[in-house]
Image (cartoon, grey):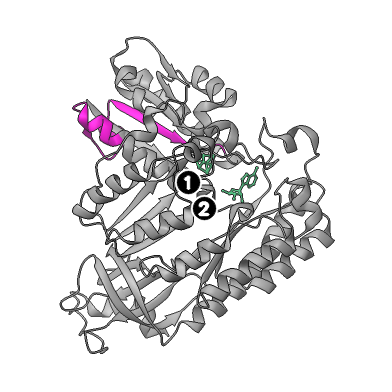
Amino acid sequence: MKATVITYGCQMNEYDTHLVESQLVSLGADLVPGVDEADFVLVNTCAVRGKPVDKVRSLLGQLRKVKAQRPLVVGMMGCLAQLEEGQQMARKFEVDVLLGPGSLLDIGQALESNERFWGLQFKDELHEHIPPAPSGKLQAHLTIMRGCDHHCTYCIVPTTRGPQVSRSPDDILRELDLQLAAGVQEVTLLGQNVNAYGVDQGARLAGYPSFADLLRLVGRSGVRRIKFTTSHPMNFTEDVAAAMAETPAVCEFVHLPVQSGSNRVLRRMAREYTREKYLQHIDEIRRHLPHAVLATDIIVGFPGETEEDFQETLSLYDEVGYDSAYMFIYSPRPGTPSYKHFADLPRELKTERLQRLIARQKEWSARRNAEKVGTVQEVLLRGDAHDAGFLEGHTRGNHPTVVPKAIGASGAGVYPVRIEHATPHMMYGRILDAFGEPLPEQPRLNPEAAAVTSPLQMA
Ligand code: 5AD
Ligand code: SF4
């Protein structure tokens, strides 16, 4: 069998794609890069907003056409698969295999079945399953918990991914050991709300550590860089900031979604914290980690959001001065309380607020990135950048970074880089040698073309 998995959505979905791909390989499948070569196409879906749902709908429509021409098995997994909305789509587009986020390990059974196979149960064995390490990668994801116990009124995830279940620290460390043996240098601990690690009932009964203690534990594994995402401010404790500060491998990067700066909107979102409480967490983080890089998620145009509420989001943005932000227009999702009870705001109003927020984010990202010019950052370079002769990667603070290939440093690796130029979205620098001097650049095949595109030359 020749299989391909197409992934939408977040890092949890990327992790699940890796898990399912490794299952497919162990079932004897060859992984192929595209639909043309495949006889099994599995779509890993996201349901958090209308846009990813629309993308899946159009892809499934295309796949149904391919199916009319030649034998093809079509599968659907991920958050949308768990919802009635997704299942209707699956029926319409003649999907053969449907796996909810809790039943990924049913993939073998699904492919053996001669009939349409739908798996929608949340199965415990998934939490104990340890996928093999990704090969040839410096970065890996590691799921430490699944599901979410919060009930933000806009969010479909508690429905799609079920209640929170923490994985055992033993399983987490075992998976990490495999990744380390495979050469991984940066691991991102994943969960819908990693700060609540260990607080679900099963985890408490089993005596699992708190998230702060898990960070300390993982920090002793020998992994070079540890990141984590994502956090709910409600479960953020000062001990997490303390653990970050005392564990050198943990990167000084915190993604703490605020969603809105207005207490009135936060209440309607059922976020369980106030603007003041959120800002207190930011203070705690800065007290322990004065150079912390801060990122957030913001929803604009939540039902009932007034211009005044929106101004409070802008003023909170200024108060924190985030390095980066993911900004979204509120998208009413069937099955959520806000969809049922609140009227959506006009599209133009939401779009206009988003544009104003993006302008604010750009100002701050430009300022924050400019502060890094002249500093030395530890950059994990993944490999070739879009421009020939350059490598791309990211800092400990998750800043996307581009450097010219250097003699002795022309491929993936973790290097010290002096930042020489920054835009709101990208930093540019040069790899340094052991004495802090730039390594000589690798001669380019076509130096004139490279000179035109080199951001360092433009600076
Ligand atoms: N509309 C817009 N954005 C949403 N998010 C979650 N649900 C919605 C929705 N219905 C955003 C939140 C969350 C991120 C993953 O997606 O900001 O943090
Ligand atoms: Fe990830 Fe949420 Fe999308 Fe599911 S709905 S894939 S958890 S972003």
Between 8 and 252, the one lying in front of the other is 252
Magenta span contains residue 38: yes
Q: Secondary structure at mark 2?
A: loop
Q: Which mark is residue 230?
A: 2
Q: Is residue 448 placed above or below 272 in the rendered structure?
A: below
The Cα–Cα distance between marks 2 and 1, rounded to whole angstroms, is 6 Å
Tell whether circle 2 marks a residue whose Cβ is less than 8 angstroms from ligand 1: yes
Residue corresponding to mark 1: 191
Callouts 2 and 1 close, C-beta under 8 Å: yes
Dot placed on the residue nearer the N-terminal end, 2 or 1? 1
Residue 300 % position (x, y) = 70, 54
Give the residue type at disc 1.
Answer: Gly
Q: Secondary structure at mark 1?
A: loop
Q: Dot 1 surroundings within 10 Å: few (below 14), some, or many (20 or more)?
A: many
Q: Quadrant of residue 159?
A: top right
Magenta span of residues:
21-47
Image side of residue 324 versus residue 97, left or right: right
